[in-house]
Image (cartoon, rainbow, N blue to C red):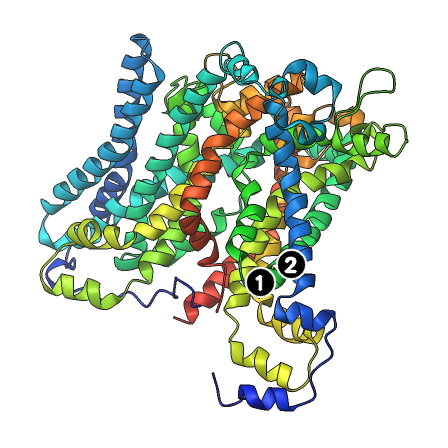
Amino acid sequence: MTLTAPLPEEVEAEAPPPRGVAEEVRGGGWFVRITILVIVALWLIPTVGVLVTSFRPEAVVNETGWWTAIGHVFDSGQWTLQNYRDALDTGGFENAFLNSLAVTIPATVMPITIAAFAAYAFSWMEFRGRYVMFVAVVGLLVVPLQMALIPILKLYSGGARLGGVPVFPDLELNGTFLGIWLAHTAFGLPLAVYLLRNFIGSLPSSIIESARVDGADHFTIFWRLVVPLSVPALAAFAIFQFLWVWNDLLVARIFLGATQENRVLTIALQTLAGARAQDWHLLTSAAFISMILPLAVFFGLQRYFIRGLTAGAVKG
Amino acid sequence: MTTTVEEPPAAPEPPEAPERPRTSSTLGLTIMRVVSAAAIPIVLFALLWLTFDFLRDADANRFALAGVAIVVGVGGVFLLFWGTNRVVDLLPDSIRGAVRPYVFVGPALVILAVFLVYPVISTIIISFGDREGEGFVGLDNYDFVFSDESMLRSIRNTLGWIVIVPLVATSIGLAFATLADRLRRGEAVAKSLIFMPMAISFVGATVTWTLIYSFRPEGFGTNIGLLNGIKSGLGLSPTAWLQETPWNNLLLMVIMIWIQTGFAMVVLSAAIKAIPDEIIEAARIDGASELQVFRRIIVPSIAPTIAVVVTYMVINAMKVFDIVFVIGNAETNETEVIAERMIEWFFISNHDGRGAAIAVVLFLAVIPVMVWNVRRFREQEALR
């Protein structure tokens, strides 16, 4: 409370302001609550529709809209788990789920590790060109990955030559997990380095200084001091990257392919939506299988995610 | 609320006296720097490739594969850094300090150079090439980009996306953030629910909304889509929403707005809470109405944040691909967008030159933002 804020008695002594919409807004009254409720309801309806439909038998789904289920909540003929069974088994979604895990986890942990070292160097080590290199990283933040797809694909399938001399060996990485891990690592690095460098650079220099005075070298400072302190930033980026890779369609399509063996959840869902566009009982359960893990991660680790988003975007 | 990240203070001068190079051949130094920068990515890659190759032959299951990748990806990477760092320790005092930073920062730079910098240059070159991306056809591909009917439509549509989506998403996000700020209870839950669609993939969101838009002609079954359900309830005949050109574009944009509003809301909410209470209270005492407080105080105070949010969303809207691709039939439905056209030409029609040209056009559109980002960054650094 500052000196300019009036004491409660003084406010009441003045003529009370009209209780119009404006005052309701300020006081968090009915207008605020109703508007918020309406917007939240609108936002939830799509997901609720999918969820409800995924538990209804095929025949029922095709005959009535999902909203009619509201009147028959306790009618056991309305509900079934068969759709999920079908999606996981014959739909191949169990395999796709494992593929998604196999792609996403390495593609999250590799860029974080590499970026953490680089961010430390950009913050606390002296070397020539440090500033210019980081400016380059900032510039790379917005390069659309469409710019990188064609050449990387060519690299993967044929290697690179410079005037007839092979500079990059032909490794046939197309359609391999290694290929997609590397691609995702590279695409995630600019943002990782940028976020982590902002955070690590803002650690109090006194801590680093006293460690150096105590004779610690850079590696020890990094590993024993900086990394434990950076856990919030590391967690925030890990969540970004996890969600981004798990939900990605384009990179997986191009580097891993759409074969039954290799495809990840997003591709499996997209293929299903194309091949069986009217089978909503299957589509919705498949969609939910693809959503359940990211939603769990999101709800469980929301705090870190939000903190990561707002740090760096908000200039106080 | 203070931001969790302060501007980084100037890096301290480490006690470098024993490590500063006095006399050293610059060529030798450079070679050592390059080697230490490239060593880790190369060794890491070789390790992964060897183990992966072995696993592939052994027909191992996904878990073994992912397990190896995690062990090598984290443990291996860390060991490599540690190992290379130890090797640098063996170097003579005079050059140790000059080489060590490249161990730390090198791997990231090498990977970025191979996977981002080189491809950008290569794509530009390919855009002047033919179907296989070889040769030189001058500006033919660019000519195509700006004259083909489908391409022109995609440009028009993309412009629509980058104007409408950020505008609507930011407005709703701002309004919601301002209102939610006044809630006495339930603010966190409300914000959480709006933010939730951000966790869903674009594919999942598109499937979700395609259900809402679903259409069955009269006599071919009940309409189970929400919109047509409402129409039927009102006694009207159903519409094929996704085929109605050009309004179907707006319906697709709704999907992206649904996803991205949460982002705008969360960031703007943090910014609003960062405005000192005294300023707002003082304005109210001076008799300002809520609308005036909003327009004259809140919005200007968070203007930089609004700019960041809008920019981020413009870039995302420019790159939109998944939504249009999943719904499919972009040409018939006239819903093409630039990023989708690029994949269509490169991946499906196998015309490398055209695909590259479209990518370059997209890149050019994004460059102003890149420049602005770099400038903002340099301003912040100057304040340190």
The reply to whether residue B118 is visible in this rendering is no
The reply to whether residue A30 is visible in this rendering is yes
Name the residue nearer the viewer: A303 or A247.
Answer: A303
What residue is at 21 percent from the left and 68 percent from the top? A206
Q: Which mark is residue A33?
A: 2
Q: Which mark is residue A274?
A: none
User: Outermost residue toward the front?
Assistant: A74
Q: Is residue A267 above or below residue A146?
A: above
User: Outermost residue toward the right?
Assistant: B236
Q: Amino acid at mark 1?
A: Leu
Kindly indicate whether the residue at mark 1 contacts the one at mark 2 (C-beta within 8 angstroms): yes
What residue is at 62 percent from the left and 49 percent from the top? B261
Q: Secondary structure at mark 2?
A: helix
Q: How many marks?
A: 2
Q: Is residue A18 above or below residue B100?
A: below
**Left or right: A130 with respect to B328?**
left
Q: Amino acid at mark 2?
A: Arg
The location of residue A275, given as percent across then percent down, is: 65, 14
**Residue at mark 2 to residue at mark 1: CA–CA distance:** 7 Å
Quarter occupied by residue A170: top left
The location of residue A238, given as percent across then percent down, is: 38, 42
List the residue tagged with mark 1: B183
